[in-house]
Amino acid sequence: MFTHDDGFELLEAGYSIGAAVELLAKSLLASLSPLLLLPATNVGADTIQKYVGVASRAGPALDIGKVKSLEAGACITRVTALGIGPLWTPQDTSSVLEVRNAAAHLGLVERSALKAAMKPMVRFSEHVRERNEINPDMRWGTHEAGRIAAKILSDELTEWEWNYHAKVNAARDRFHSSWGNLPDIYVEELLRARQDWTPAGGEYAEQSTCPDVVIRAGPTDPQMTGALR
């Protein structure tokens, strides 16, 4: 899709990627409770009636045009907080929503941005498909499209694996250069002690979680995540 020469096709693809992730996120929230789709502000009577499922007996009929829902970024954040979404990073959110917004509001799309946004969109879609036990051919329309989606996901996992091992080796080299003579018995304790430590200054002063390590080791492995910050 991101190799297409038609500018309008590229614009449609850019918008569709962001819209797909938003709707997939909303489907996950709605599967738990429609109330999770309520926006944080400006909640009108029509919106409340829609999500609560109670029609007004005295007032006018529900005006569907006035029904609001949680905006896309907040949906993804809520899905992640509830632990019902795919492996995801803030960079993924920026990637899919920025390419959608550029296509919708500016009429612009860059092939590199479209290609980068395609990967997390496929990951999100495959997560929802597997969660709902939907056949790949049915989800993607054709067997070939399903095969391509599986290949995109497989290649992304391979790339994460390479990045993970590269960062582990770099961390190991740095560790040994600093504490090469430390007995192995103290290594685990030292990593635990330094898990939430942030340097006072310098190039690595900002503390952040490495997405490759979280994805490879799992978000429930704080020792590995902290050790490689």
Image: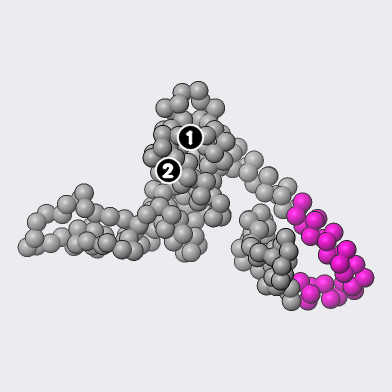
Q: Quadrant of residue 147?
A: top right
User: Do we see residue 134 in this rendering?
Assistant: no
Q: Say above or below: 39 vs 116.
A: below
Q: Main secondary structure of the magenta part?
A: helix
Q: Say above or below: 229 vs 27.
A: below
Residue extending farthest top: 5
x and y percentages locating residue 175 in the rendered image: 83, 64
SS category of the residue bearing label 2: helix
The residue carrying mark 1 is 109
Q: Is residue 56 left or right of residue 22?
A: left
Residue type (three-letter) at the residue carrying disc 2: Asn
- Which residue range is magenta in the image? 166-191
Residue placed most toward the observer, 174 or 57: 174
Residue drawn at x 35%, y 57% as measured from the top left: 70
**Quarter of the picture holding the C terminus:** bottom right
How many numbered circles are shown?
A: 2
Quick check: is 57 in the magenta stretch? no
Label 2: few (<14), some (14–19) or many (≥20) C-alpha neighbours in 10 Å: some
Q: Quadrant of residue 46?
A: bottom left
Residue drawn at x 28%, y 55% as measured from the top left: 68
SS category of the residue bearing label 1: loop
User: Do we see residue 42 in this rendering?
Assistant: yes
Residue extending farthest front: 201
The residue carrying mark 2 is 101
Residue extending farthest left: 58
Residue placed most toward the observer, 45 or 31: 45
Residue type (three-letter) at the residue carrying disc 1: Val
> Which labelled disc corresponds to residue 85?
none
